[in-house]
Image (tube, rainbow, N blue to C red):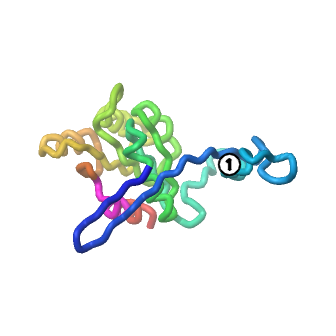
Amino acid sequence: RVEAQSEEGKGSRFTIHLPVQVVSEADSPTSGPEASAQDKSKVQVPPAQKDSGPGETERRTPEGGAHVLLVDDNPTNVVHVRDFLESKGHKVVLAYSGEEALVLAKDAPDIVFMDVQMPGMDGIETIKRLRGDVATRDLHIVSLTSLAMGEDRQRCMEAGANDYLSKPVSLRKLLEIVDERSE
């Protein structure tokens, strides 16, 4: 898939999304005579790193970036945001529902970007539950919504959001917010 963004006088951005099958070193050999042509076309990733120990989960990426939780039920909305933030040295974890966000928020991300309109548990209810849990009540939460009415902002803030952004969100603005949280 190819995406293009252009703004007169400022330039253009082209994003190319290529399908990749990711395998761990343990899943399949990718070199040597026993590897097939199909195996050699796969992207190899090292096995997952283990935490230092109980209660010692590393919150920052090795480069010092922020740990970001991005919550949105539409995968196409989050892929380019994730890729962009990761290219800037931030760790991005995706949640596709409010329920999934409640679980992943226990890892204490530096910032949570929360879509408001999701089926099932919407962003407003998810924010309320995060604020009601001692383990997640102090998270920095930015609500994201295509609803740009004043009362929508008020609902998000009353639910406990720290900030509110209307979609479509500028990648530059998201990066500014994330960079502030990673300092």
Q: Which residue is mark 1?
A: 42
Circle 1 crowding by C-alpha within 10 Å: few under 14, some 14–19, many from 20: some
The residue located at (25%, 51%) in the rendering is 165
The answer to whether residue 7 of the structure is visible from this angle is yes
The residue located at (33%, 33%) in the rendering is 118
**Magenta stretch containing residue 170, yes or no?**
yes
**Magenta stretch containing residue 6, yes or no?**
no
Q: Quadrant of the C terminus?
A: bottom left
Seen as rendered, the residue at the extreme front is 37
Q: Nearer the viewer, residue 115 or 13?
A: 13
The residue located at (50%, 58%) in the rendering is 86
Q: Quadrant of residue 110?
A: bottom left
Q: Position of residue 161 (x, y in %)?
A: 29, 46
Q: Quadrant of residue 64?
A: bottom right
Q: Amino acid at mark 1?
A: Lys
Q: Position of residue 101 (x, y in %)?
A: 44, 37
Q: Main secondary structure of the magenta part?
A: helix
Q: Is residue 168 above or below residue 147?
A: below
Q: Nearer the viewer, residue 149 or 12?
A: 12
The residue located at (35%, 58%) in the rendering is 4
Residue 96 shown left or right of residue 161 in the figure: right
The answer to whether residue 51 of the structure is visible from this angle is no
Query: Which segment did they paint magenta?
Result: 169-176
Q: How many numbered tags mark residues here?
A: 1
* Secondary structure of the residue carrying numbered label 1: loop
Q: Position of residue 78 (x, y in %)?
A: 41, 47
Q: Position of residue 25 (x, y in %)?
A: 76, 48
